[in-house]
């Protein structure tokens, strides 16, 4: 996730390579090897490109480059999508999580319980506001297991950060009940889950505050860095607005310790265009996920989606004990794969030995997970090829 450019294969996306693998005595043998990039960040749809350029042109014309009118429109649109009273546009998903935690008063001396399996920004946001992350475990669906949270609650615990990992909403009813019983705040990290639903409720509508990333690799993607925080409480909203620019109130007076996490108008303008196309994009991702579910369920563990959940498929994550060999096999066939997120956050070099936690299931699970290309640009031909290559490996 740290890389910001197109993936390593992206310049060759769509190019057909004539290599064949001599070791592959299966259905794919003799077939030309296709390049399947994990992501291709180029804007290849001409109509979309024209719309994005027009959106940028509008900003160049009015000149309100930071927090301009498109930011306000974007905030209103996001609040509507995620069924919140307010959304505040910020500079990145990392900013969103830092500002969300700061706005609800999380700081030094506080503990925040979260999953071990997320992009490192989740835990770093907790550390940046001066609090300590505590790592619970995950369930079969690879999201935070509510039962594993309870034994970790101490008299310093102030909040739970639920990460809707890979695009699947956590068991929020259970987490809400725990938060209520123990008087904890509940925060959602929705960086990977814009558009996901559970029991009809969208990601971002469950916690006290919710953070989103719209960086260029996320589902709803800007052409750079962007994020948002959503909430229902006007006091939190006002504090977020101040915190995103150095804690200033009325432009002059610093009321809170803050930094610069403002949103660029150009990103908001382009995101408004992308938002229009998002339902089609999400439908295509779900279609490809359904295709893989059908094609692969008998050879690997496919994503476990509970009844009533609508997955946003930020990634399509399969699980197999033969993960490393399968990854090598797929890469040898031109298919770019990713392991998200290894090492687990509490096992990162700057975390080891510093924080409490108990996550044996995550430590096993991280050895078996693999994300295969499943974004909206993956063609019918490419996904058939990916599925054939996975199946060939197991035959
Ligand atoms: C991407 C991501 C973030 C951080 O978002 P940026 O926009 O890259 O700063 C935070 N949490 C999760 C779960 C993410 O995937």
Image (spheres, grey):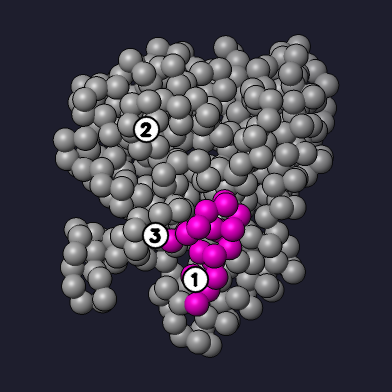
Q: Secondary structure at mark 2?
A: strand
Mark 1 closeness class: few <14, some 14–19, many ≥20 residues within 10 Å:
some
Say which residue appears at 24% left-offset and 69% top-offset. Answer: 248
Residue 160 is labelled as: 2
Q: Secondary structure at mark 3?
A: helix
Where is residue 184 shown, x and y percent of the image?
Answer: 33, 33
Say which residue appears at 71% left-offset and 42% top-offset. Answer: 285
Residue under label 1, please give it: 72
Looking at the rendered image, the quarter that the C terminus falls into is top right
Report whether residue 44 is seen.
Answer: no
Answer above or below: position of 121 versus 140: below
With 77 as the anchor, is 183 left or right in this view? left
Cα–Cα span, label 1 and label 3 = 16 Å
Say which residue appears at 50% left-offset and 87% top-offset. Answer: 62
Is 208 or 47 nearer to us in this picture?
208
- Please give the count of numbered marks on the rendered protein: 3
Tell me where residue 107 sits by quadrant.
Answer: top left
Residue 234 is labelled as: 3
Look at discs 1 and 3 and give the one toward the viewer: 3
Answer above or below: position of 203 versus 11: above
Cα–Cα span, label 1 and label 2 = 29 Å
Part of the protein shown in magenta: 69-88
Answer above or below: position of 272 versus 250: above
The reply to whether the magenta stretch includes residue 260 is no
The reply to whether the magenta stretch includes residue 83 is yes
With 302 as the anchor, is 124 left or right in this view? left
Look at discs 2 and 3 and give the one toward the viewer: 3
If you read the primary sequence from the N terminus, does the residue marked by circle 1 or circle 3 appear first?
1
Q: Are marks 1 and 2 in contact (CB under 8 Å)?
A: no
Answer above or below: position of 51 versus 134: below
If you read the primary sequence from the N terminus, does the residue marked by circle 2 or circle 3 appear first?
2
């Amino acid at each position: 996730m740290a890389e910001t450019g197109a993936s390593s294969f992206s310049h060759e996306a769509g190019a057909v390579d004539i290599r064949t693998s001599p070791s592959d005595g299966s259905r794919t043998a003799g077939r030309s090897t296709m390049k399947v990039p994990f992501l291709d960040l180029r804007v290849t749809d001409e109509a979309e490109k024209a719309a994005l350029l027009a959106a940028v042109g509008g900003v160049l014309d009015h000149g309100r480059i930071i927090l301009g009118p498109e930011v306000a429109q974007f905030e209103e649109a996001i609040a509507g999508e995620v069924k919140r009273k307010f959304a505040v546009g910020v500079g990145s998903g990392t900013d969103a999580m830092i500002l969300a935690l700061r706005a609800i008063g999380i700081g030094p001396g506080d503990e925040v319980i979260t999953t071990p399996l997320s992009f490192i920004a989740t835990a770093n946001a907790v550390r940046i506001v001066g609090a300590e992350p505590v790592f619970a475990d995950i369930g079969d669906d690879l999201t935070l297991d509510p039962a594993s949270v309870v034994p970790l609650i101490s008299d310093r615990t102030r909040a739970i950060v639920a990460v809707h990992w890979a695009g699947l909403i956590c068991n929020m009813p259970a987490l809400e009940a725990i938060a209520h019983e123990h008087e904890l705040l509940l925060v959602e990290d929705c960086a990977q889950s814009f558009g996901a639903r559970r029991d009809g409720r969208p990601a971002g509508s469950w916690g006290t505050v919710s953070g989103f990333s719209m960086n260029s690799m996320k589902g709803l993607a800007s052409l750079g860095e962007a994020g948002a925080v959503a909430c229902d409480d006007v006091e939190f909203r006002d504090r977020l607005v101040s915190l995103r620019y150095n804690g200033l109130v009325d432009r002059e007076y610093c009321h809170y310790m803050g930094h610069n996490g403002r949103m660029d108008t150009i990103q908001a303008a382009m995101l408004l265009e992308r938002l229009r196309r998002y339902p089609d994009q999400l439908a295509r991702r779900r279609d490809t996920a359904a295709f893989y579910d059908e094609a692969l369920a008998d050879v690997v563990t496919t994503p476990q989606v509970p009844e009533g959940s609508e997955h946003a498929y930020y990634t399509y994550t399969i699980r197999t004990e033969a993960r490393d060999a399968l990854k090598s096999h797929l890469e040898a066939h031109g298919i770019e794969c990713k392991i998200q997120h290894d090492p687990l956050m509490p096992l990162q070099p700057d975390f080891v030995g510093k924080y409490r936690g108990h996550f044996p299931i995550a430590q096993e699970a991280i050895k078996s997970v693999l994300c295969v290309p499943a974004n909206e640009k993956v063609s019918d031909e490419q996904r058939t090829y990916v599925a054939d290559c996975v199946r060939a490996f197991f035959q």
